[in-house]
Image: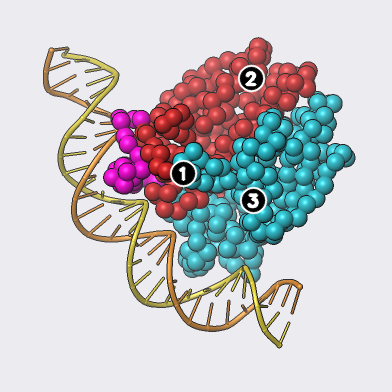
Chain colours: A cyan, B red, C yellow, D orange
Amino acid sequence: MISIMLDRLFADIPGAFVADFEAGAAIFRQGDEATAIYQVRAGMVSLVRHIRDGSLLTVATAGANETFAEASLFASHYHCDAMARVPSSVLALPSNAVRTYLGADTDHALAFSEFLSAQVRDLRGRLEILRIRRAPERVMAWLRWRARGDPPTVDAGDAWSRVASELGLTPEALYRTLTGLEKAGLLQRNGRRILMSVRE
Amino acid sequence: MISIMLDRLFADIPGAFVADFEAGAAIFRQGDEATAIYQVRAGMVSLVRHIRDGSLLTVATAGANETFAEASLFASHYHCDAMARVPSSVLALPSNAVRTYLGADTDHALAFSEFLSAQVRDLRGRLEILRIRRAPERVMAWLRWRARGDPPTVDAGDAWSRVASELGLTPEALYRTLTGLEKAGLLQRNGRRILMSVRE
DNA sequence: CGAAACGTTGACCGTTTTCAATTACAGTGG
DNA sequence: CCACTGTAATTGAAAACGGTCAACGTTTCG
């Protein structure tokens, strides 16, 4: 999970501000002039594209600390709607100011590349996990991927129900799978902490 | 699908070369010094991480025109193995030369950021699609996402069996789903081309 | 305190996987 | 030019799996 703060990466960007939105409120709309790059501070924001045939296609969902609309740096208009799914707070950095900041120093631009590159790695990992079809294997892959320390431990930052959604499972399926894995001796649960068994 | 050619993005990088690998051959190994960034020219390459408990975790899979190990620009060592799944040909760009190239001009660094940012967008879209649980909806989302032109058309670049794997489905499930969608009048198939129905 | 999430478990049902068999097709070498 | 071989495409039937619905306990927080 990428959790670099944009305002730390882009120090002192003039015009940065935080805004709050009610559930269902639009942060920007498809076709609007692209003016800012965002990071979710709290809540959840979905990016939704309007398709020619009238249907809607969700192209991204950003939870706490995740960024969206980075592409506004390189495009003149937004290509989708951004909508708060739940009451949300977002940090907005004006694209112009960010462009200026990046253009002023190759180190800044390289730091941004590094940030994006980490994100690419993260997303590829999640993608690989979602392609696993069986729930127990998928959950184990996710846990191994997130485990840190010795013994390998995973702290669920989010509620399990939200983890379930990230994993492409229903909450019920996740609970059951976790119980199953615990019974199989592959892990141990202590509240919202999970200890992975290290077997030789 | 991102298909920008790295050697077009990074013009005249000294030391760039193409190398061929047999199925199963390692392009680099976890712990090796990070010396290059890669793009698959033909074939398929998996990035596999060795976990403390002895198991293997696939953290990415790159098909034709996809890049991997961009992070080698920012890290001293590789954090996973890269293994050719099938006989593969890869383009390698030395990280040092790329770093020099990016540092020489903010335009270069910004172009690289744009490249990565497009990739982030692409990956988020794929992720969103994989979280859809029912096969017909998942396949429709994938098709709508890839459709171009008027009428909206999708050309399967890969074999359907490989598309199935990208979609997190078995080939059989994909075939059946496609026939089902065709019967429901949502699309038409002409060999490996799919026409989306545009209904008002 | 009470409402609203979150966590948990059971039973049933629908979908997808699995296994198997068959057809189509492209490339290879005789 | 044509069997020959391997991969892709397709369909069927049965089983396994995860989803859905429902009920209830628990925690969190205003």
Residue with the mark numbered 1: B141
> Share a chain, discs 1 and 3?
no
Packing grade of label 1 (10 A; few <14, some 14-19, many >=20) is many
Circle 3 Cα neighbour tier, 10 Å, few/some/many (<14 / 14–19 / ≥20): many
If the image is split into quadrants, where does the C terminus of chain B sit?
top left
Q: Is residue A168 visible?
A: yes
Residue A45 location, x and y as percent?
A: 65, 51
Q: In the figure, B171 relative to A25: above or below?
A: above
Q: Residue at x 39, y 48 (%)?
A: B136
Residue A43 placement (x, y as % from top left): 69, 57
Instruction: Name the kind of residue labelled 2 in the image.
Output: Leu
Residue type marked 1: Ala
- Give the residue at x 52% y 22%: B90
Q: Is residue B79 visible?
A: no
Q: Secondary structure at mark 1?
A: helix
Kind of residue at disc 3: Met
**What residue span does the magenta drawing correspond to?**
B169-193
State the separation of the CA atoms marked 1 and 2: 30 Å
Regarding mark 2 in the picture, which secondary structure is present there?
helix
User: Mark 2, chain letter?
Assistant: B
Residue pictured at 48% horizontal, 63% vertical: A173
Query: Residues under labels 3 and 2: Cα distance?
Result: 33 Å
> Which label lies toward us, 1 or 2?
1
Number of the front mark, 3 or 2: 3
Give the residue number, with chain letter if any, for mark 3. A83
Label 3: state its secondary structure: strand
